[in-house]
Amino acid sequence: QVQLVESGGGLVQAGGSLRLSCAASGRTDSRNIMAWFRQAPGKEREFVVSIRLIGGRTDYIDSVKGRFTISRDNTKNTLYLQMNSLKPEDTAVYYCAASTYVGEPRERDQYAYWGQGTQVTVSS
């Protein structure tokens, strides 16, 4: 089992920045990829970005390219999401997830482990 705990959400004005963190514990060696998903009110949970823990290859959705940056500190078993130039449409609960898949999984059911989520609200 892998336990994931997110932190760093909050309320920010449009154009502002936030940094999310996700601390992993448990059988962390069972992960190949970690990702951030988000779910806005009334919408499906969507993939945002992933990173391979070995090699660091990343996969972003187009709407956050150039604004969001995913990174990880393998020594601390911690995943980060730096979010800049935030927009009201970025408002959502952000979830950290871990997968054992090979490749670049973007589907929710390809991720076996999930955090509880952290709220990000961007005001206009």
Image: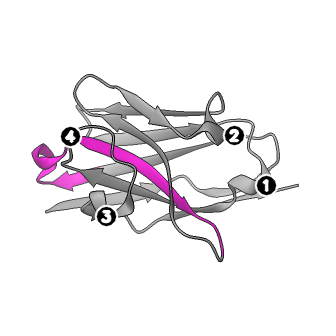
Q: Classify 10 Å Cα crowding around label 4: few (below 14), some (14-19), many (20 and above).
A: few
- The part of the image, by quadrant, that contains residue 85 is top right
Residue numbers of the magenta segment = 24-41
Q: Please, what is the three-letter code of the amino acid marked with disc 3?
A: Asp
Marks 3/2: CA distance? 29 Å
Task: Answer left or right for 86 relative to 30.
Answer: right
Task: Answer left or right for 100 relative to 114.
Answer: left
Work out whether 14 lies above or below 95: above
Which numbered dot is residue 67? Answer: none
Q: Earlier in the sequence, mark 1 or mark 2?
A: 2
Q: Position of residue 119 (x, y in %)?
A: 59, 64
Q: Secondary structure at mark 1?
A: helix
Marks 3/1: CA distance? 27 Å
Q: Please, what is the three-letter code of the amino acid marked with disc 1?
A: Pro
| Mark 4, residue position | 102
Q: Classify 10 Å Cα crowding around label 3: few (below 14), some (14-19), many (20 and above).
A: few
The reply to whether the magenta stretch includes residue 90 is no
Nearer the camera: disc 3 or disc 1:
3
| Mark 2, residue position | 17
| Mark 1, residue position | 88
Work out whether 43 lies above or below 87: below
Marks 4/2: CA distance? 31 Å
Q: Please, what is the three-letter code of the amino acid marked with disc 2?
A: Ser
**Placement of the N terminus among the 4 image quadrants:** bottom left
Marks 3/4: CA distance? 14 Å
> Residue placed at 75% from the left, 55% from the top?
89
| Mark 3, residue position | 109
Circles 4 and 2, Cβ within 8 Å, touching? The answer is no
Q: Earlier in the sequence, mark 3 or mark 1?
A: 1
